Amino acid sequence: MSKLKILVTGSSGQLGQSLREISSQYTAFDYYFYSRPEFALDDEQTMINVLSSVKPDFCINCAAYTAVDKAETEKETAYNINEGGVGKLALLCRQYQTKFIHISTDYVFDGNASSPYKENDPVEPVNAYGASKAEGEKLALQNNPASVIIRTSWVYSLHGKNFVKTMINLMNQKNEISVVNDQKGSPTYAIDLAQAILDIIAYKQWIPGIYHYSNKGTISWYDFAVGIQQKIKSNCTVNPIPTSYYPTPSKRPVFSVLDTSKIETTYKITIPYWKDSLDKCLNKL
């Protein structure tokens, strides 16, 4: 029996590299990893070339424009990739009979909630990046109603730039750092998310729709930093500060905790607690 083919786009990003890292554990699949420029969401021809040659059974789209602050001044680029490109890819997957999994973000919400966001809560982004991702979700489902969209938050891993690696560097260099304590969310270890995605593909049934995935627990960025500091036994002092002390070009949602019960019950996914996953990541580091 021939193996199912999985195409992974954005393979040089955190999630793409994490999927590559665990791919050997899921031996029922053949993997095809692509990043720019061989597969670019703003270049339809490259997408057609790859899909027509690989003919994948599944496409996991990890490719995106993710420069949150830059998106405020590069809106056109952000929308070309996160909306237009995603819409085209969803349509192509439908044409090639490829099941489409698209990764989205907690930034589609306004951050004014007081309880975890459910999949059907109103989408009201507070920045250009979030708005481009929200439009991409809409277009993906419009062009390919059989898509699975997974919103995630605060992603970190051994790869690329992320909060955990930044904090470790700062704690090694400085005696004292300040971290925002009035934005609440849940971190996501990219390896956990990668496993969840491959478990969905391996599941006996394909159930399209929007899902939320992040590790368990609600914390602030400050709590996250303290968790890292304790784990690496750093002597660096971590001070809590309000967002107003650390202005950024792009507004951030104040509260972006995701309710993950739908993905847990639908696809029987078990989600680890954030501290356990942080331990796993830092032990590898």
Image (cartoon, rainbow, N blue to C red):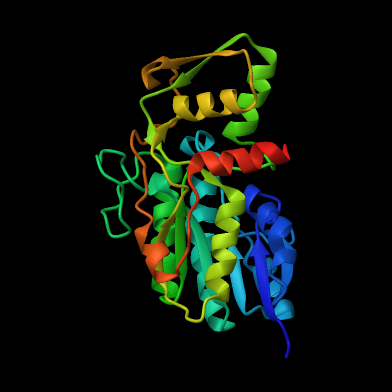
Q: Where is residue 84 shown, x and y percent of the image?
A: 50, 60
Q: How many marks?
A: 0
Whether residue 249 is visible, yes or no, is no
Q: Where is residue 152 shown, x and y percent of the image?
A: 47, 51
* 222 sits to left or right of 169: left
Looking at this view, name the residue that lies furthest to the bottom: 1
- The image quadrant of residue 41 is bottom right
* 265 sits to left or right of 72: left
Relative to 193, say whether 148 is above or below: below
- Residue at 50%, 30% (x, y): give it: 224
- Residue at 75%, 65% (x, y): give it: 24
Which quarter of the image is occupied by the C terminus?
top right
- Residue at 72%, 41% (x, y): give it: 284
Which quarter of the image is occupied by the N terminus?
bottom right
- Residue at 41%, 76% (x, y): give it: 145
Relative to 263, say whether 95 is above or below: below
Whether residue 275 is visible, yes or no, is yes
Q: Where is residue 276 shown, x and y percent of the image?
A: 55, 42
Q: Nearer the viewer, residue 215 or 136?
A: 215
Q: Nearer the viewer, residue 31 or 90?
A: 31
* 245 sits to left or right of 99: left
Relative to 266, say whether 158 is above or below: above
- The image quadrant of residue 233 is top right
Relative to 84, say whether 226 is above or below: above
Q: Nearer the viewer, residue 277 or 18?
A: 277
Looking at this view, name the residue that lies furthest to the top: 175
Q: Where is residue 278 shown, x and y percent of the image?
A: 58, 39
